[in-house]
Image (cartoon, helix red, strand yellow):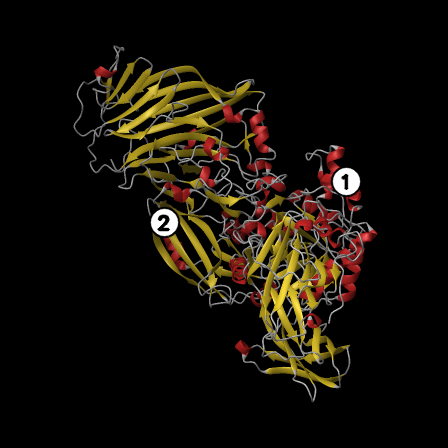
Amino acid sequence: MAEPLSLSETDGIPDYCNEAVFRRNTLPPRSYHIPETSLLLNGQWHFHYASTPADAESYTRAHETPFDASKRWTTIQVPGHWQLQGHGIPHYTNVQFPIPVCPPFVPTENPTGTYQRTFRVPSSWDKYSQLRLRFDGVDSAYHVWVNKMLVGYAQGSRNPAEFDITAFVPERTALVELRVRVYQWSDGSYIEDQDQWWLSGIFRDVHLIAFPSENRIEDWFLRADLDNDYTNGNLEVAIDIKAASTASLVVTVREQHRNGGETVASSKTTVQGSRKAQFSIFVRAPNKWTAETPYLYTVEMTLSTSTSTPHTVYQNTGFRRVELIGGLIRANGTALQFHGVNRHDHHPRLGRAVPVDFIRRDLLLMKAHNVNALRCSHYPSHPKLFDLADELGLWVIDEADLECHGFYDAVARPMDIPEEMDYAKRKKLVFSKAAEFTSNNLSWKPAYLDRITQMIQRDKNHPSIIIWSLGNEAFYGQNHKAMYEYAKWTDPGRMVHYEGDPEAEAADMYSYMYPSVKNLIEMATTKGVNPDGSFDKPVILCEYAHAMGNGPGGLEDYEKAFQTYPRLQGGFIWEWASHGLWKEEVDGKSFYAYGGDFGDMPNDGSFVMDGLLFSAHKPSPGLLELKKVIQPVKIAVNGNNLFFSNLYNFVGLDHLLATYKVEELGEEATLFASGSLQLPPTCPGKSAEVAFPTSTRVARKSDKDLFLTISLVLREETPWAGLGHEVAWFQHLLSKGEGENHTIPLQQNPNLLSSSFEPSPLWVNRYLTQTVISDFGDYPPKTALDNGEILRTPVRKEPGGGLVFDSERPIYSPGFSFTFDEARGYLTRWAVGGIPLLEPDPFTGAAIIPSFWRAPTDNDNPHSLPYWKRFGVDNLTSQLRSFSTLEDSNGVTIRVVTFLSPPVLAWGFETTTTYTISHLGKLAVDVHLIPTGSIPTHLPRVGLNLRLPRRFECVKWQGLGPGEAYPDKRSAQRMGVWSVDSIAELQTPYEVPQENGNRMATRWVKVLELQGTGIRAVAGESEYWSDNCEREFSWAASRHSTRVLQDAKHPCDLVEQNATLLRLDARVAGVGTAACGPGVRKDLLVKVEEMRFSFVFEAVGI
């Protein structure tokens, strides 16, 4: 029988409030391995929830009370979190602790979940086998009972714990009762303050495991190293064994079954007792493991005696060497470039209880989007993730379950340190004080060492893991130095990372978060650089390009720095996926929730929604942008040649098939030529030159835009993508057309077949405060004039250039009218053939109006939004200064002078808007802006807002597409002719509503009804565009007003307008990453300066 164990190791102090107690009666950590003799205990458990440990269910009266699944108990799914199954609420914080800061103590109100179930030991198992209970993840601390006897205690939420329960199950055929009491808060919570939801419970697998009782392999560490020439392999073997008598240990290296399964090498040794067997096995010229060539071997380890059943375990391994040479991290002698992401374990309905197939989907998406590296943030991921990374090929930073960022607020808030203060200054004031709580506190040293020990011992056999990380945002202290020493002593073949160590004393690299490109380059060229220019350690970005909402912008700038400065070995985007939790409310609304949506206080709001994937793990535009920016093949044009630069570290380009096509872009995209390109052998880091296909040279004679598009696709299927998957692409403008697809002169109508067409007369009708321009004299009806004065002037152009005033309406006229508000200076309506094309906005009264505002993005919120609002950019008003009408041979011109300015302030735009209406019913709108007064330096945009009837549902355009684009986030979009059948298809459904859906580099855009009726907009003549505006314009179409977008918390809060809202812009700002990082590059801001732009509109399909 087992010896009795007290509930607390130290009398009067609960285990969960004692930093010196984090494991009681647990087995030594070992490599992750679940043998065939195992029983998965996942599924439905009985569950009791209490607000404090004192109220939790407990055994009483010497364990005599039988279990009663009464109304005090319910059921719960394991693995899972109790907050997602009706007990308590999820709670999100980024930095701040949600509990008072007084480590190691936690609140009295410490929700406690008691789990209970029964099981039977399988009768097929050896009755003398050792029985173990394994928990792979429990948040945050727990006691375990078996058959009403306390077995032990463990904490470290994302680390496993294994208990030997052999003595607690004396009768192998009897029903075994298992109880686990889980505490939401423990002293461990202070060093588990990662940026994620606080979720509790048994959230990873629970296994009952049987191992041989006398002769077994306990653990192993296989280092598949290479020689100094990176040619031959050496498998360094260290195996912990227990042998009651003399035993034979055989270690065999084999090809995997898919590669034939042949034996590559083998070694046999004799062992006895409990000891570590260490030896090496030579392997001649093995295939090397890299993230680009993830070649695996299977190692079979068998321990056998003459009297016992052999104990065999298997481990996949890959031969590779990771080392620091010349100040750079190298694998197999080659310097690496990390195109990585930070990944949390997250599922939108299950929290951190993530199924393995969901994890696999994540990694497949990474590979398909050219991601080659993964940082486990900020704890060891699900153990099976690393098997997948080994198989698919990813460089991995495995990170200890350690973060105590909340001590920053505990120190900084009483000091009233503003967040706007320079980060380096805040760091100097706060970090050393914050470190004293735990990181530089010797009483916490064992707990810190346990975190690094558990990670390394569980994951040490995976070739994909090349860097251990000491945790995240835990400041820096002597406990980190102890962790570093343990890592280097235990596993000298891997690098160690820790961003919190500013001088890289306990790290093999300098690591930074969110610097601007300018600062990054400065650090790369100065930090730790020797007088001769050499350096001993590289620079990486463990976090950059914060992917919150509409972003990240500026990826091209970072990539250029990585390619220019070899010491910059890349970085890891923050972060892979948003952490929204699906919530369904009683009013029928449903959405992905973030901080505060569950009534959790304090919280950090939507800062948890910052991923390249939406919460359902579907790609956002940010991931598509990343894929293009980091594509492993760069293509450039030089004269009549194409240059293909191979940016892979280890492989050539022979696995890729190159194809090309030449398209003429007019009203439609017309294919002129296509074919394949023969890529010459191109070694990693080298370039190859290929001549332009002959067919592309012939095609260049077109008078329209001609684009060459090259696509590089997989030649064969891979484990992560199918045949034909596109890896890289390139587009080049062969010739630029200036035909009708760009600018349609006011007097030209390409839809007319007759060359003898005469323009129709125009009528200028004035009454009250309205001016109506039409090509028929009976509009508006007299009954609608309320006795207003009418001036009707028919205008018709004569061949000689004079004006003829006529009262007749030509029969060939389609009939159109434009209505202006003379009191305010707006165009309010446009109709053709009785069909309204533009209508007045209910707030401004205008159908077309200059505009500078849009809904803010997450990246605008910290700095740009308050700046813009301080200048009233969101609240500009219009004052009419003059309204004049000119009738000439070109038609009718209305010139409106207004002053656009905000209340309270003394700045604005002197705005001259000129409307020119041709005899054909086309409308040109020319806007000239002159800023005056105490102006802001930059704006969100400059352009026009138009309001169309709701029936205009379809859009077609020539320009970048098919997705959204912004000046610093446009690389993933291609020039083409694109179309959508609904306005909704143009929207990006950000889970926090914000500015979205902008399209750029547009030649023309049509907004149409289903049957093809609508309007077409193009840029006006170049003489009406100032150099600081972009004639290849931007546009967006939506059903959501700016106000609705900026006020909505979730997509379900968006209320559609009964209209189609069109935006045409001469300039739009980039998006940047200022939610956590640098803002928009200065040259991609919309500067407040004199500007001029022009658009021409015509009706189509009428």
Query: Looking at this rendering, what residue extends furthest in the right direction?
Result: 442
Q: CA distance from mark 1 to mark 2?
A: 60 Å
Q: Quadrant of residue 334?
A: bottom right
| Secondary-structure class at tag 2 | strand
| Secondary-structure class at tag 1 | helix
Which residue corresponds to the image point at 74% horizontal and 69% vertical from the top-left?
Answer: 2
Left or right: 314 in relation to 745:
right
How far across and how far down the image is residue 270, in percent?
75, 85
Q: Quadrant of residue 202?
A: bottom right
Which residue corresponds to the image point at 27% horizontal and 11% vertical from the top-left?
Answer: 788
Classify the position of the C terminus by image quarter.
top left
Which of these two is toward me, 981 or 611? 611
Which of these two is toward me, 1088 or 406? 406
How far across and how far down the image is residue 950, in percent?
33, 35
Which residue corresponds to the image point at 43% horizontal and 54% vertical from the top-left?
Answer: 709
Query: Looking at this rendering, what residue extends furthest in the bottom direction?
Result: 306
Q: Which amino acid is tagged 1? A: Val
Residue 295: tell me if it is visible.
Answer: no
How far across and how far down the image is residue 478, in percent?
82, 52
443 lies above or below 35: above
Circle 2 sits on which residue? 664
Mark 1 or mark 2: whose residue is earlier in sequence? 1
Residue 430 is labelled as 1
Which of these two is toward me, 554 or 611? 611
How far across and how far down the image is residue 572, in percent?
62, 52
